[in-house]
Amino acid sequence: MKVLVLNSGSSSLKFQLFEMPEEKVLVKGLAERIGEKIGKFKIGNYIIEKKLTNHASALELLTDYLLNPDNKIITSKDEIKIIGHRVVHGGDKFVQPTIITTEVKDKIKSLFSLAPLHNPANLTGIETAEKLFPKAIQIGIFDTAFHQSIPQEYHQYAIPEKFYKEGIRKYGFHGISHQYVSAKTNEILGKQDTKLITLHLGNGASACAVLNGKSLDTSMGFGPMNGLIMGTRSGDLDQSIIFYLMDKMNYSSSEIQQILNKQSGMTALGGSNDLRDIEKQANSGSKKAELALKMYANAIKKYIGDYTAKLNGLDALVFTAGIGENSSLIRQLATDNMEYFGIAIDKNKNLKPYDYKGDITNKNSKVKVFVIPTNEELEIAKQSFELILDLKKNGL
Ligand code: ADP
């Protein structure tokens, strides 16, 4: 069965077409700069550069490509039975994969204020796909859903209760990725009752404590700015700084948003949001870059400590996403001097993790340390496909 996965951003659309349950990728690509003068549509070497007025223009190019007889992918749009959409914010309304209905779309809309950059784009993607693939079942997979298992003692903030009742609480993000890598880790460990910490280190970054396959706590909260230090986001910060910036330095709330979201993190510390640049500078002797890397790793350590305490132990520590999968230096810095926690990596394996099937554990380490590539699109395809299988099994 063919399952199309769509991840719609405000000016981008990432897509993958899978044959399920074989998990075979038939097509993978993206459209960028939607709405700008010249957009770009790319599937491997097949590249079109022209104005993409909206998400529909991008999806039309995709359907043309899929239907082109030379590409031998589909002969009719009806062959695509399921479309799985990544939806960033599901609030506390969505705990699992959900078939899109008018009511579901209204709920996604009601969450616009919690995810103003993401949810409107996600909904546009859904509405466009509904028009272009009217026979397909549209399914929403929510980035917050995995974290709905976080108990109140870890998801409530210590502020007046009326705000909690208004929905001000920890939601957490990157749930699809944490779920995917934690399930993979349990497969490797050969058991489900495990204590894990998963570290999704991409442009955005978050840590997650996973107990018996369920999220117990995560480092992002009400929004995606706190927790670990990220490419352009500050991570954890003392709230009084915000009031100082406002009251003493006359910054407006939107300027502070911009500073904490776009001008902070590694961009502020090391002059680039790309960790490769900072590693290069550190290699050429830059003390500033060295400090930036240490601070990045320290933020990770803080959460390893926090979550090991909450889990009361640890079976495995898992690195994933752009930085987690590729930066041996960050993996080394984040696990240095952690013998007390029973964590030690093998320095050689860490340099070539995939030669060791992602297992970079030192032979003296109590805790396993893995590098596991994340695959959010495959997770979306799997969850969407399984939902339909379940519904069929139950005769619905
Ligand atoms: P996104 O959050 O946008 O999905 P990714 O998970 O693709 O991001 O991570 C992107 C980041 O990964 C880049 O900004 C870069 O800092 C980092 N990265 C990618 N490759 C390497 C590498 N070889 N060494 C260090 N960092 C890398």
Image (cartoon, grey):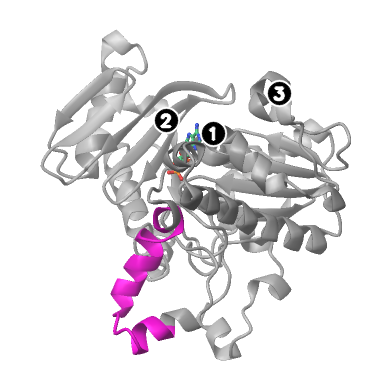
Residue farthest toward the top in the current orientation of the protein: 70
> Secondary structure beneath disc 3?
loop
**Is residue 258 visible in this depiction of the protein?**
yes
Q: Main secondary structure of the magenta part?
A: helix
| Callout 2 amino acid | Gln
User: Who comes first in sequence, dot 3 or dot 2?
Assistant: 2
Check residue 141 for magenta coloring: no
Labels 3, 2: front one: 3
Residue behind mark 1: 378
Residue at point 50%, 61% (across, down): 90
Magenta stretch?
243-268
Q: Nearer the viewer, residue 207 or 260?
A: 260
Residue at point 39%, 63% (across, down): 261
Please indicate whether residue 15 sits to the left or right of residue 38 in the image.
right
| Callout 1 amino acid | Leu
**Residue 330: percent from the left, percent from the top?**
60, 42
Residue 16's tag is 2
Residue behind mark 3: 357
Q: Verify CB contact (< 8 Å) between mark 3 and mark 2.
A: no
Specify few, some or many for label 2: CA neighbours under 10 Å numbering under 14, 14-19, or 20 or more.
Answer: many
Residue 154's tag is none
> Secondary structure beneath disc 1?
helix
Q: Is residue 91 above or below residue 276?
A: below
